[in-house]
Amino acid sequence: MSETKESIGFKRLKWHCRRGMLELDLLLEPFLDEVFLTLDEEDQKRFYKLIQCEDQEIFPWFMQKEVPEDPDLARIVDIIVTRVQPENYQA
């Protein structure tokens, strides 16, 4: 996958991080800008998978009201929540 901030794939991913809910924008866009490129390839694939989900599906995951059934999605949600809200996060 070897994305860079200048690559078409990264720019496309940034576009997909712009969601219909401000709360999701405030989580996903900074994570993409600050962390995504440091992830290993498997976690980057998990992020791509997450971005394909609908807002109403992922919102409860990030509000820690639900946990995704899919272990790949559960892992990337955990990574994002931990990186974005480490002081508030409880496993």
Image (spheres, rainbow, N blue to C red):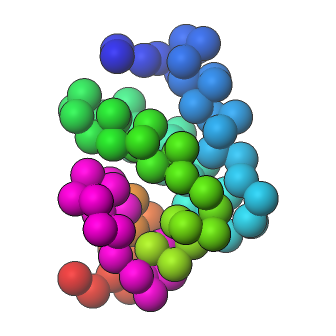
Seen from the viewer's position, the closer of residues 2 and 49 is 49
Seen from the viewer's position, the closer of residues 42 and 86 is 42
Seen from the viewer's position, the closer of residues 30 and 10 is 10
Q: Quadrant of the N terminus?
A: top left
Q: Is residue 60 above or below residue 71?
A: below
54 in the magenta segment: no
Can residue 58 be seen?
Answer: yes
Q: Quadrant of residue 55?
A: bottom right
Can residue 87 be seen?
Answer: no
Position of 31 with respect to 39 (left or right) is: right
Q: Position of residue 10 (x, y in %)?
A: 55, 23
Residue at image position (48%, 73%) is 62
Magenta stretch, residue numbers: 62-79
Residue at image position (42%, 42%) is 49
Position of 46 with respect to 62 (left or right) is: left
Residue at image position (74%, 65%) is 21
Seen from the viewer's position, the closer of residues 48 and 5 is 48
Q: Position of residue 28 (x, y in %)?
A: 56, 53
Position of 47 with respect to 52 (left or right) is: left
